Image (cartoon, rainbow, N blue to C red):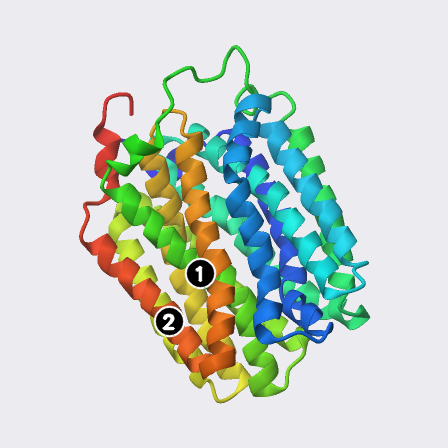
Amino acid sequence: MSRPSAVKLPFEVWALVAGAFTVALGYGVVAPAIPQYAHAFGVSNLAASGIVSAFALMRLVSAPLAGWVVSRFGERRAYTAGILIVALSTGACALAANYPQLLLLRGAGGVGSIMFTVAATALLIKVSPVEARGRVASLNAAGFLLGGLLGPVFGALVAGFGLRAPFVFYFLTLLAAATVVWVALRGSTLAGVGKDADRRAAMTLGEALRVRQYPVLLGSVFSFGWTSFGVRVSVVPLFVAAAFHGDAAMAAWVLAAYAAGNAILIFPSGRWNDTIGRKPLLIVGMAVGAAAYFAFPASPALWVACLVMLVAGAGSALANPGQQAVLADVVGKRRGGKVVAGYSMSSDLGGVLGPLVAGGIVDAAGFGWAFAVSGALLVASAIAWSLVPDSRALQERPGE
């Protein structure tokens, strides 16, 4: 077997990483402003967190539709159309006159988001060399996470122009991402459905559920979605505002620290997933993330909160590439649109429930309990991964 770092990656991988970076850059700008923008309409913490949940909820319920769109029109068209839908809804959010309009427009963006997410993930699995699945997963994550590192830095500057300005910036970066993917993949047979498309039988969701690692993966990405895609972007900015009397710019620096923790370990994590294995990285990553979320509400100063989020980001970097690599191991070289959709739906379910439940807990019992529940979910995932074999053994199946 070739060394992971020596395997040449297909051009499609690099195109998708570039698109991921562009999307994440804009999202990193807008994320700290979302709950505080909602607060500006005079709503509660629960309602402000609900803006994040509305986006994730629409992703969740639209996942079956996204799978059909990808199969019918191809990954390239679904990816590009999805980004354009998010761009239009985001631009309209900057013009929202009240909370219901903001909630509706942000939710509409979730439909486009799941379209390009499923398309990109399915394509990455298809084109990833078996020996370098962890490396490809880390590159994809790095595209998002490095964009997320720079995004909040830009966000701190853009926020100075008002809470609507980040939405305009995100609109422009989404248009750029759509252009990158459409142009770069225009000649790729892997990016569409045609005579050269893979004709092997698709893996059904039932088949995937009989693979021991897949149900654990669904629980793991649920916990990850709850904390990283839900609580981090909704409750963390609210905590900064309440504990340190901070504004959107201050919250942006805390989220930037999380992205920095990701950036430090994301590339080594990919290599380690291909050499050491998925299981050790998943267990350690979930445990480190749990410890950070337990500690965060006790932060006595802003610099301590940034340091704790740096550690949480490092834990995320250890675990996240392994989750996508496990998905690739489960699907193998077969088409797996429904399996990928199930993976995305589980993550989005966590993203829906996390902000709502955590926001409700904050209103009822305080920030400490909200972060404790989040940490407990990551602990449960670490324990679950310790009970199943490493998914790299699945690579020994015929056809791999």
Task: Left or right? Give the position of 237 relative to 393.
Answer: right
Q: Nearer the viewer, residue 2 or 374?
A: 374
Residue placed at 65% from the left, 48% from the top?
Answer: 109
Q: Quadrant of residue 246?
A: bottom right
Task: Left or right? Give the position of 136 relative to 32.
Answer: left
**Residue farthest toward the bottom in the current orientation of the protein:** 300
- Going from the N terminus, do you reach mark 2 or mark 1 first? 1
Q: Nearer the viewer, residue 376 or 198?
A: 376
Q: Which mark is residue 148?
A: none
Instruction: Rate crowding at label 1 as few (under 14), some (14 to 19) or many (20 or more) other CA atoms within 10 Å.
Output: many
The residue to which callout 2 is attached is 373
What amino acid is found at the position of numbered circle 1 in the picture? Trp
**Residue 297 placement (x, y as % from top left):** 45, 81
Residue placed at 67% from the left, 74% from the top?
Answer: 43
Instruction: Rate crowding at label 2 as few (under 14), some (14 to 19) or many (20 or more) other CA atoms within 10 Å.
Output: some
Q: Is residue 5 above or below residue 207?
A: below
Secondary element type, mark 1: helix
Q: Quadrant of residue 131?
A: top left
**Residue 218 placement (x, y as % from top left):** 35, 48
The residue to which callout 1 is attached is 226
Q: Quadrant of the N terminus?
A: top left
